Image: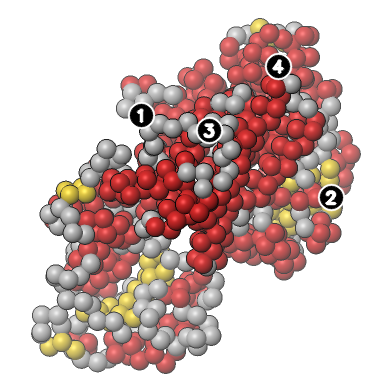
Amino acid sequence: MKEIWVEKYRPKTLDEVVGQDEIVERLKAYAKEANLPHLLFAGPAGTGKTTSAMALARDMFGENWRQNYYELNSSDERGIETVRTKVKEIARLAPFGGTSFKIIFLDEADNLTADAQAAMRRTMETYSKTSRFILSANYSSRLIEPIQSRTAVFRFRPLKPEAIREYVSRIAKAEKLKITDEGMEALVYVAEGDMRRAVNSLQVAASLGPAIDADVLYKVASTIRPEEVKKLIEKALEGEFLRAREVLDRLLIEYGLSGEDIVRQLHRSVFDLNVPDESKVRLLDRIGETDFRLTEGSSERIQIEALLAHFALIGQDLSKK
Amino acid sequence: MTARPILGAGMNWAERHRPKDLDDIVANPTAVAELRKWAAAWQRGRPDKKAVILQGLPGIGKTSAALALAKEMGWSVVEMNASDSRNAEAIRKVATRGAVLQTFSDSGEFLRADQGGRKLIVLDEADNVFGREDRGGIGAIVETIQTSGQPIVLIANDYYGLTRRSSSLKRLSKTIKFQPIHDDAMKNILRTIATEEGVEAASEVLDVIVERSSGDLRSAINDLESLAIGKDTVRGTGTKALGYRDRERTIFPAIEEILRSGDARRAKDAATGLDESPEDLILWVDQNLGHEFGRPDDLARGYDALSRADVFLGRARRRQSFGLWSYAKELMSSGVASARKGRGRGGQLEFPYYLIQMARSRAQRGARTSLATKLARHLHVSRTLVLDELLPTIRMLFQGDEELRVNLTATLGLEDAEVALLMEEPESSHAVKHLLEKAALVAGSRATESKEGSLPAFDEDESDAA
């Protein structure tokens, strides 16, 4: 059955997880002892946090692991209500089939509001008999101290080229693909240590034809990255404020992105801009301020417009020089 | 206890057009069917669950459904809502009255409870039975359910708020969920009401009302009524929105003062003289500031002031302290006016189109969100990551391979609007229909397989975790 490869080839057991050897060793010990403290998986996207949690559950609980494994995503519902209702409701359920606890995987936990995190802390204590939590986060520092201190922290690093090569080769073999050496290097380069991106790029490239070389992969990489935000910045820097606003409206209205999504992408791209460091720092400050205002409930369009006006101002300074 | 107002003139539209019969509650057919089923069980004796909890957001027909049910069954109604005191004593009183006393029916007929004239006890806003003020209220409700021989309807916006206080309440009651009113359905209802009221309402106006309502029909009807008071047409006008045409006459001169006078005092006076909330005024300033201010430094300063004004609006909203509006109003007028050092561009002022575009695209955004939710669950990532990063990839794979397309559509149960977004084809296109037919076949054959137990555990949807 044809499906999306990141799911089809997601490692099922801890043995299949690549590139995080030390972490896997420790997790295997938990699985063997059938015991687990609360865990915190910290690290960038695509480094195996969710996969390791699922694999651990499978190794620990066996065939019917899904009955005792729950997955919740905090970035979509990050208020205190979620913790008080959903999380708590799941946490208080008794584990199935004679195991002593179940695993609750809380993805992107660093997106929970401070209130919600505080509520989490109590939930983790109250229900620790029936529930062990695995929190995942891009940045462990965005979790409040009391939560960090209640968890064993595992730091997932961007995957090394060897790990990506190893896993991609396995998929290539299973799918009967021919990847050239340059193609493999290109894949490692565009992945930037993110296995999800590597596998997605590979699948898109494979859908275009059986021969996978560097050209195809670079082409794929440029098409599967959203370019609209780049356009937004370009127009603003060129002083085309109204054009930039059109792009902004398109992102908000047609693409359905939230203001916070857009600000986050702007943030990510600042260091790639062709502007002096001093301007980058000024922009960072503005972006941070905008982000903060949005979390306070300000209007996304007006706040981002104000940010774009500053991009335009910096653009003008540059063109004068 | 609240008396039902006499139907007829002098009532507001939302009350006057409250559906009288269950058949008139068109937007929540499943909920209505469940409610009927529960009532039918009462005809045969006592059902397992003597109470139902009608759960859902405000303004979507819960109370109407309860009252219409009573009418259909020929039951009289004993009603309590949050404005009544609801401590244990008060609730017991009502409950016993419902259960024991003899009353007249609506038609004046003398009915005795013990002779089969049932009474429906309706406890509106049941989630607002507060611990302290309404002492023992929840306990009394539970006791009433246990002891009363009468059907009981509890109505709540916040289901968790209600049931977390008492697990027996949850156990003793059947829960029926009401959904927010769908955009198209709401628009139809508004159109019908407008016609019955003898008011002509333009389609664009209805779109904006629907957008603002977020599925709350009562608020939408209130909006429509407030726009229509004293008029026989409510039109989109040249600028196509909420009766904004009349407002242009007064708003444009004020916007001119703000953007073109360069004088903080004059700008402030213009803003103060307007009968507009700053929440609305800021939209007009925002739309025109970008056109009017040519120099980048002017624009940056202007938007600094405007964005600060917006911060104050947010604070006022959050804290419900509308005294803060004065700062917002000054920042968006004087602040903007004094920001311009260079020359303005001049030219025609514009209506804030953004709102209308948002209104028009609402259905599409809804489909995008639901698509992202399904993909997020399948791929074990957040919705934001799907929207932010993964959608272009999935779209390419989806468009590039039919087998994958059919499988994914079947596995995730994608609907036409969602498929249309992935295919980048119109919803009504042949390609979309063809795909949905094929996916239905696959889904059908999988359902048979799974009965035989051959569906691998790994493909199961973990919706129980969501």
Q: Are marks 4 and 2 on the same chain?
A: yes
Q: Position of residue B346 (x, y in %)?
A: 44, 32
| Residue carrying label 4 | A172
Q: Is residue B157 left or right of residue B319?
A: left
Give how far apart the Cα atoms at labels 2 and 3 are. 58 Å
Provide the secondary structure element on which disc 4 rests: helix
Quarter in which the N terminus of chain A is drawn:
top right
Q: Position of residue A60 (x, y in %)?
A: 76, 48
Amino acid under label 2? Val
Give how far apart the Cα atoms at labels 1 and 4 are. 36 Å
Observer-side mark, 4 or 3, equals 3
Amino acid under label 1? Glu
Q: Are marks 3 and 1 on the same chain?
A: yes
Is the image coloured rainbow, by chain, by secondary structure, or in one colour? secondary structure
| Residue carrying label 2 | A153
Observer-side mark, 3 or 1, equals 3
Residue in view at x 12 percent, y 88 percent:
B110
| Residue carrying label 1 | B427
Q: In the rendered view, would you say A49 is above or below A227?
A: below
Instruction: Say the numbered circle drawn on residue B9.
Output: none
In primary-sequence order, the first of circles 4 and 2 is 2
In the figure, residue B142 lies in which quadrant?
bottom left
Residue in view at x 50 percent, y 61 percent:
B325
Label 4 lies in what chain?
A
Q: Position of residue A309 (x, y in %)?
A: 60, 35
